[in-house]
Amino acid sequence: MLYTRKGDDGTSGLFGTKDRLPKNSPIYDALGALDELNSLLGMCRARLVSYSFFQLQNSIERSQESLFIIQAELAGAEKILSQEHVDTLENAVDSIEKLIGNPHAFTIPGATELSGLLDYARAVSRRVERVVISVGTTHNISPASTAYLNRLSSFLYALARYTAAEAKAKESSPSY
């Protein structure tokens, strides 16, 4: 069944508890933001397929899996992201940086459709990080999860620069 009617009164339950909280509670903002980012990463992953970036597609899918673990952790499940997840993401960023160099200025998003979509995901990722950290004062969130969310935006930034470079698109920086 795709609906339960339990939330019709404006409340929802978290994993492992019978308590019901108002749907406008900050924890649901965090869980919803993680869900939004996961869906946006799915769009990025689908777009990567059409550009034949199959290895990057797998990296995005692993990131989506990690976001599910962070959601479960926030909701109270006994799931915790490991430092290995953070290390894997850092290694991916390091590998991409070796290929493209270290950009020394901000980049105006949208050199290609794919790089623009990845930059959009990066911006959403930064918001998700802020929202999750804000509920970390009332709900347990592991240091590895907050570190992962911090690295995820760097990973998405690196992917955006890499895919633009592979498309031989000229990226520009703000002129201020």
Image (cartoon, rainbow, N blue to C red):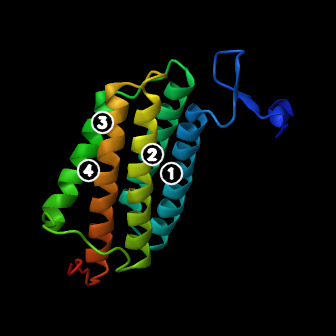
Distance, label 3 to label 1, CA atoms, is 16 Å
Disc nearer the start of the sequence (4/2): 4
Dot 1 lies on which element? helix
Distance, label 4 to label 1, CA atoms, is 19 Å
Quarter occupied by residue 100: bottom left
> Which residue in the structure is indicated by mark 4?
92
Quarter occupied by residue 123: bottom left
Mark 4 closeness class: few <14, some 14–19, many ≥20 residues within 10 Å: some
Distance, label 1 to label 2, CA atoms, is 8 Å
Disc nearer the start of the sequence (3/1): 1
Mark 3 closeness class: few <14, some 14–19, many ≥20 residues within 10 Å: some
> Which residue in the structure is indicated by mark 3?
147
Quarter occupied by residue 35: top right
Q: Which amino acid does label 3 sit on?
A: Ala
The residue positioned 45% from the left and 55% from the top of the image is 124
| Residue 37, disc | 1
